Amino acid sequence: MKPMKPMKPMKPILTLLIFFSLIPHTYANQDKAGYVDSLGRKSLPSFAAPETVNENSDILILGNSLTHHDPSNKVEWFGDYGMAASARSNDYSHQLLKLLNIPSDNAYVRNLYPLEINSAPLQRFSKELNKEVGPQTKTIIIQLGDNVPDAIDKTKELEKSLLGLFNNVFLSHPQLEVFCLSTYWGKSHVDQVIERTCKANNAHYIYIGDIFPTQNLNKSRFEHNGVNMHPKDKEMRKIAEKAFENIAIQQYKCPNWVPSIIINADTYQLNFPKYLLEYMCHNYSIKS
């Protein structure tokens, strides 16, 4: 038997092709023409503002496709809520509302495409958002950044948009508590901009980038790889819990052990009224 010939080393071009084919679609932020978003589009669409049920809302939840995405045949997404959730009630916004015991009619949930990469519509968005903020509006969740390439020189438009939202909307209403979520896909350069901008404006920064590495991409799989990379129900729940814990501690002034009681009660479908949460935490902070 002839001895086997040693394998020839792969050509550099072939090696690169194999490497890039293994990179998740979500992280492929550049193509030959330039920008590509997390769903493979060369620009972010602009969605119409949601219809307002109440004149003013208790909470505004503003973000990208993780927060809300219209149905899109192009990416085989047919929901009208947070992308990759199995139902509206299972996206992070609505799971958070349930933990806070806020009716969905009292919440304003909106996709702010394309502010992550283009600050041009900022004035129009600011004007529309100011109409949604009233005396009873207490909480803002801002979740942007996942569609920004993870490079310092690519974050300028996002930073401009975040600063504009603070200056034009959030800081005009002193009763608001603002909570900024990090990127879901752990983009460190983008996260630095989010954290720095939010803390500079007395907002609270919540890191959620540790959730994606635990996600099973083969569970409840979607055909479109970009959609499939989004958080499913389990991950949506984790985002909601992180947001709730911070709201309970920072806004309601709860001791650290209270949020876990609420979360466990909700897990077993035991309703925990919002007024009781506020009463218990308020009394605790006064007594301590």
Image (cartoon, rainbow, N blue to C red):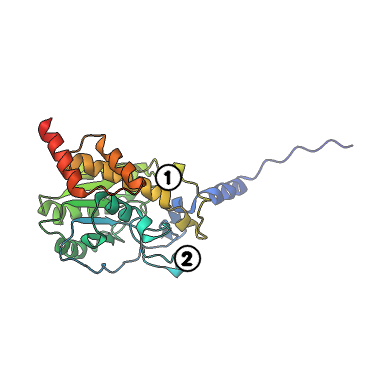
Q: Is 183 on the left-hand or right-hand side of 3?
A: left
Q: Examine the rendering and report whether any part of residue 78 can be seen.
A: yes
Residue with the mark numbered 1: 212
Name which quarter of the figure residue 39 lies in: bottom left
- When the figure is inspected, residue 215 is found, relative to residue 106, above or below; the finding is above
Mark 1 is on which residue type?
Answer: Phe
Q: Is 171 on the left-hand or right-hand side of 264?
A: left
Q: Residues within 10 Å of mark 1 (few under 14, many from 20)?
A: some
- When the figure is inspected, residue 82 is found, relative to residue 199, above or below; the finding is below
Residue that protrudes farthest toward the right in the picture: 1
Q: Residues within 10 Å of mark 2 (few under 14, many from 20)?
A: few
Residue that protrudes farthest toward the front in the picture: 270
In depth, the one of 279 and 135 nearer the eye is 279
Rendered residue at 37%/43% (across/down): 209
Tell me the CA gap for discs 2 and 1.
21 Å
User: Image quadrant for the N terminus?
Assistant: top right
In depth, the one of 144 and 58 nearer the eye is 58
Q: Is 191 on the left-hand or right-hand side of 127?
A: right
Q: Is 5 on the left-hand or right-hand side of 259?
A: right
- Helix, strand or loop at disc 2? loop
Q: How far across and how far down the image is residue 77, in percent?
A: 44, 64
Mark 2 is on which residue type?
Answer: Glu
Q: How far across and how far down the image is residue 92, in percent?
A: 34, 52
Name which quarter of the figure residue 241 lies in: top left
Q: How many marks?
A: 2
Q: Earlier in the sequence, mark 2 or mark 1?
A: 2
Mark sitting on residue 76: 2
User: Image quadrant for the C terminus?
Assistant: top left
In depth, the one of 30 and 53 nearer the eye is 53
In depth, the one of 279 and 204 nearer the eye is 279
- Helix, strand or loop at disc 1? helix
Rendered residue at 58%/50% (across/down): 17
